[in-house]
Image: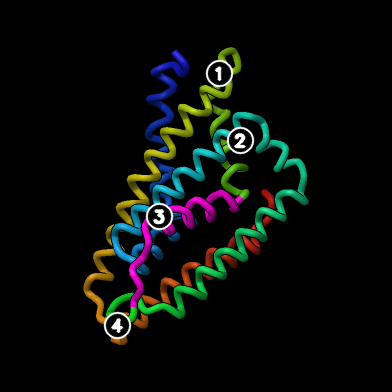
């Protein structure tokens, strides 16, 4: 087998605990659910999970260690993520969450945004480099083990973040455009995106 069943059983609860811990990915899916409803919230979760899986593949191939070793590469990716999150924050602030003036959220676009946000957060690959190797058997092929563990993390994150987006989407269905509640939730959504950008901008490499 690629991974020993005992090791996999030890990995699953730890991975789920990490998925449940609130972080940038969960906040992004929450904001997308508030912004567009349950379907965009789930779509954002799909994109985030795909991004996390790509990070795992890169870590397994050794490219993650290369990014970690070169601060300039890390900084380019980080600031690209900051700029993208600020753009989404501005669009969210300017766009009504509900009502006739609210454009329909495209689930495919939400998925791509989730993928881009996760992929431009180099802290994710550094985390994977620190966490996943603890469960890797160096006497077995390394990349297949990373793929197994990455799949488990992606599935757990997909379910948990998707449920968060669905919950936020349920709140959005109760809104009418222009009401105080709608304006407050739109501000909250925009602030979440802006806060994620600020967090990424101020984050250190380690």
Of the image marks 1 and 4, the number of the one nearer the N terminus: 1
Is 112 magenta? The answer is yes
| Disc assigned to residue 5 | none
Q: Is residue 29 above or below residue 71?
A: below
* Distance between mark 3 and mark 4 Cα atoms: 24 Å
Asked which secondary structure carries label 3, the reply is helix
Is 13 magenta? The answer is no
Q: Residue at x 37, y 45 (%)?
A: 158
**Mark 3–mark 4 contact, CB under 8 Å?**
no
**Mark 2–mark 4 contact, CB under 8 Å?**
no
Q: Is residue 59 above or below residue 136?
A: below
* Residue under pointer 1: 137
Mark 2: few/some/many CA within 10 Å (<14, 14-19, 20+): many
* Residue under pointer 2: 58
Magenta part, dominant SS? helix
Q: Residue at x 69, y 51 (%)?
A: 205
**Horizontal relation, residue 12 to residue 144: left or right:** left
Which percent across, then down, holds residue 159?
A: 33, 45
* Distance between mark 2 and mark 1 Cα atoms: 18 Å
Give the magenta range: 102-121
Asked which secondary structure carries label 2, the reply is helix
Which percent across, then down, holds residue 148?
A: 46, 27
* Residue under pointer 3: 108
Q: Quadrant of the N terminus?
A: top left
* Distance between mark 1 and mark 4 Cα atoms: 55 Å
Of the image marks 3 and 4, the number of the one nearer the N terminus: 3
Mark 1: few/some/many CA within 10 Å (<14, 14-19, 20+): some
Nearer mark to the viewer, of 2 and 1: 2
* Distance between mark 2 and mark 4 Cα atoms: 43 Å
* Residue under pointer 4: 177
């Amino acid at each position: 087998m690629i991974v020993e069943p005992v090791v996999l059983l030890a990995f699953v609860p730890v991975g789920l605990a990490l998925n449940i811990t609130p972080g940038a990915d969960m906040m992004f899916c929450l904001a997308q659910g508030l912004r567009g409803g349950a379907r965009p919230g789930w779509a954002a979760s799909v994109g985030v999970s795909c991004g996390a899986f790509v990070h795992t593949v890169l870590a397994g191939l050794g490219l993650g260690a290369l990014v970690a070793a070169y601060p300039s590469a890390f900084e380019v990716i980080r600031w690209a993520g900051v700029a993208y999150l600020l753009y989404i924050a501005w669009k969210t602030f300017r766009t009504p969450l509900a009502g006739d003036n609210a454009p329909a959220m495209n689930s495919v676009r939400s998925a791509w945004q989730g993928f881009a946000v996760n992929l431009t957060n180099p802290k994710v690959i550094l985390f994977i480099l620190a966490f996943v190797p603890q469960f890797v058997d160096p006497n077995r092929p390394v990349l297949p083990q990373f793929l197994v563990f990455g799949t488990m993390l992606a599935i757990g994150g997909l379910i948990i973040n998707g449920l968060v987006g669905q919950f936020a989407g349920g709140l959005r269905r109760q809104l009418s455009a222009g009401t105080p509640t709608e304006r407050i939730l739109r501000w909250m959504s925009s602030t979440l995106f802006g806060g994620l950008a600020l967090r990424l901008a101020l984050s250190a490499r380690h």
